[in-house]
Amino acid sequence: MSTATLIDRRKVIDWLGIAPFMIFALMFLILPTLYLVAGAFFNPQGEFTFQNIKDLTHPTILSAYWISIKVSVASSLGGALIGFFLAWAIVLGGLPSWIRSGMLTFSGVASNFAGVPLAFAFIATLGRTGLVTVFLNEWFGFNLYSTGFNLLSFFGLTITYMFFQIPLMVLILTPALDGLKKEWREASEILGASNWQYWRLVALPILWPSLMGTTLLLFANAFGAIATAYALTGSSLNIVPILLYAQIRGDVLHNPNLGYALALGMIVITGASNILYIWLRSRAERWQK
Amino acid sequence: MKSSRLLAWIAIAIGVIYFIVPLIGTFEFSLRMRRGEYTFDAYQSVFSDLQFRATFGYSMLMALLTIVFGMLLVVPTAYWVRLRLPQIRPVIEFITLLPLVIPAIVIVFGYLRLYNSSSWLPLTNTTSGTNVLLMFSYMTLSLPYMYRAVDTAMRAIDVATLTEAAESLGAKWPTIMFRCIFPNVMSGVLSGAFITFAIVMGEFTMAALLNRPAFGPYLQLVGANKAYEPSALAIIAFAITWLSMGFLQLVSRFQKTAPLKA
């Protein structure tokens, strides 16, 4: 009897040790999110309803989701592709080692250089009086803005987002490329495979969970970002985080519960891509042992 | 082999152009304030702006408080989980990754609903309450990085043996925590601190929606109203990020040379 209570007391102390963390996580991470998720299924009168979810198909909201998804897909695919080539170049390109360390250091900085200052940098570069715009105009007589290019658009936002997407891809993919064993390449060469066959039949099948997984991570990364877009376009570009920002500020949808549904939609999209990412990463790790 | 090296150089060249040109463009733009010549006028204008100093100081203080309280929360938790509750590690790790899954704007939306003036805990009623809420939001944002950094550092030390050794010498819990565990995971604490610093200094969403005078909303305000100062500020922000990451690399190099135990 006395030993039983002793064990129980020890267990209680064990669990008390993580109580501060659990309380913090509940109060400032889990409950606020659950509150919104639950709120999405009620009307302002407090009755249960699916109306808010149905109302997400309103053209303004639907187009916001659509533009957000387009920007996120484009910037994550572009970031993944360019990031892959850069990671390939520094790992397998046979370049001097200072390029590798320099690239990785810079990637660490650039992947964290987001938000408002990033928008400023691109306005100063590709804005109407930006360096590149002026340079092209004065030296080549080429007016960038006459081609229909606009920094404050889907395309401009995609280019800007890639500034933090590419480095993130480089940082995550470099270890995966390091994990490609020399023996695999040698074995395939002995069996008569060409370079193309090696990549198509050996390297890419091993890498694709990492590639796909990281692309999904980049997607979620872009989907939730707001500061860069807001500083770049004000509220002229209708993407989901900016719509939600306006909703929080001034209830532009005229229905607080519809705002919750909007947030729920964001969680579902970023959540789904993260779950896929985790699943793909666990597949990728099988080869990295 | 030759052609692949050429291809690699081309890839690097394209990458460098894409990354360097915006930085050069920003720097060049920041020098253009006076017509016809390059000057540092924009920087002077920024540094002499009282609001710049106030918001910069505010965010700096917030970053320091976030680091201190974040570490006081994360280090004991990571320690306790390794020592007593290894079975719950996946759950804790999952929770620490949630801030990467749930967008910041959604989290702060939840705060505004849960802690507004008519709720059970009206934190946003007072300035100090809102400051506390903002600090908690920053702790939440930096949780994935802090926990990862500390947990990695803790992997390198033998927590159980250290604790037993300290206990057999008569040390109490505070002594074990602050004189034994903290110094041994210092490298993790520091790398978590630098990344937290970089995040908090530039953070916009939380501060703007909680209406606090932080550096991020100030940047946005300047960007909407002035021409050359934003570029100067972007260069300053980039320098801050670069410094934080530089220190982070320095610390992690230090960590690698430290004796590693499985």
Image (cartoon, coloured by chain):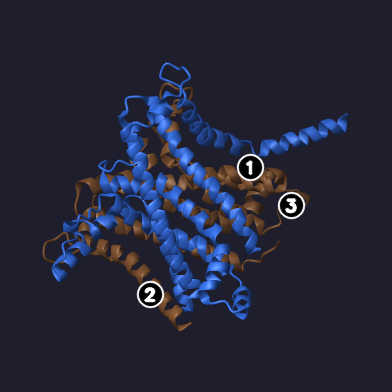
Chain colours: A blue, B brown
Q: How many marks?
A: 3
Q: In the rendered structure, which amino acid carries the disc numbered 1? A: Val
Q: In the rendered structure, which amino acid carries the disc numbered 2? A: Ile
Q: In the rendered structure, which amino acid carries the disc numbered 3? A: Ala
Q: Give me the C-alpha separation between circle 1 and circle 2.
A: 44 Å
Nearer the observer, disc 3 or disc 1?
1
Residue B257, horizontal then vertical, whole percent: 60, 69
Query: Which is more N-terminal, label 1 or label 3?
Result: 1
Where is mark 3, residue-wise?
Answer: B160
- Lateral position of residue B24 relative to residue A108, left or right: left
Q: Is residue B113 above or below residue B168?
A: above
Q: Is residue B261 above or below residue B145?
A: below
- Lateral position of residue A112 relative to residue B231, left or right: right
Q: Quadrant of residue A83?
A: bottom left
In the rendered image, which quarter contains the N terminus of chain A?
Answer: top right
Query: Who's the residue at 48% across and 30% down the image?
Result: A37
Residue B155, horizontal then vertical, whole percent: 66, 56
Other-residue count near label 1 (Cα within 10 Å), few / some / many at <14 / 14–19 / ≥20: few
Assign a secondary structure to mark 3: helix
Residue A19, horizontal then vertical, whole percent: 63, 36
Q: Give me the C-alpha separation between circle 3 and circle 1.
A: 21 Å
Residue B236, horizontal then vertical, whole percent: 32, 58
Where is mark 1, residue-wise?
Answer: B91
Query: Which is more N-terminal, label 2 or label 1?
Result: 2
Query: Who's the residue at 51% across and 63% down the image?
Result: A173
Along the line of sight, which residue is nearer the eye, A100 or B241? A100
Q: Quadrant of residue A275?
A: top right
Chain under label 2? B
Query: Who's the residue at 39% across and 59% down the image?
Result: A78
